[in-house]
Image: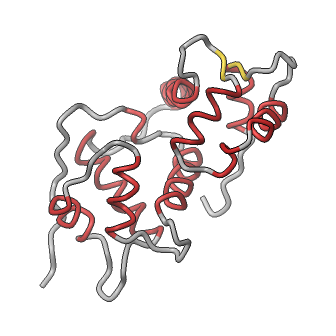
Amino acid sequence: METVPTKPSLAKKPSPSFRLRNGSLNALRLRRVFDLFDRNGDGEITLDEMESALDTLGLGADRAGLEATVGAYIPAGANGLGFNDFESLHRALGDALFGPIVEEEEEPRKEVEDEDMKEAFRVFDENGDGFISAAELQAVLKKLGLAEARSLAAVQEMICNVDRDRDGQVDFGEFKTMMQGITVWGA
């Protein structure tokens, strides 16, 4: 019996950053999210791992809804979503919530990419002052459950690696340069 994916419903309007229009940024972000959700590193995200990750992020997943929506993307005989399945789920959710991505002319695409980059920057710039401090970066890394968040010295070193003007913070220009320098293999 083939199951049909359930159309998702959200209580509040989702952030447009759910789907970046820049392919390589989106692929990188999806891979990082996949790796975070895949707690045991077996290459699959089980429903239990998905539920746990969503709870950690404060999104309190309804198990039945999760099973209906995510379960439709788990291949027969698999314990969970592989990366390609996760990517298909993400694309389907994006299409259901925002409509399919329509190819745009080059100039509007650049404006959209800049807006996506600003949205990503705002995730880290928690106080909205236009800079990412070591404390702000550490807070976001903690929310994501990353080990690097345990050491302020490690976080400060991360800041130093991209801080061209050596003011101890990352401004939007430095953030943008860093993000544009990221290579996504296989994307």
Q: Quadrant of the C terminus?
A: bottom right
Residue at 17% x, 36% y is 11
Residue 104 vertical position relative to residue 88 in the rendered view, above or below: above
Residue 182 on image: x %, y %: 71, 45
Residue 53 on image: x %, y %: 40, 55
Residue at 45% x, 68% y is 84
Color theme of the render: secondary structure
Residue at 36% x, 61% y is 50
Q: Quadrant of the N terminus?
A: bottom left
Residue 185 vertical position relative to residue 155 in the rendered view, above or below: below
**Image quadrant assignment for residue 127:** top right
Whether residue 77 sits left or right of residue 37 in the image: it is left
Instruction: Report the residue that reaches farthest toward the left.
Output: 1
Instruction: Report the residue that reaches farthest toward the top.
Output: 129
Residue 7 vertical position relative to residue 177 in the rendered view, above or below: below
Residue 57 on image: x %, y %: 40, 44
Whether residue 75 sits left or right of residue 26 in the image: it is left
Residue at 69% x, 47% y is 148
The number of discs equals 0
Whether residue 18 sits left or right of residue 130 in the image: it is left
* Viewer-closest of 2 and 9: 9
* Viewer-closest of 3 and 10: 10
Residue 115 on image: x %, y %: 50, 24
Instruction: Report the residue that reaches farthest toward the bottom.
Output: 77
Whether residue 129 sits left or right of residue 58 in the image: it is right
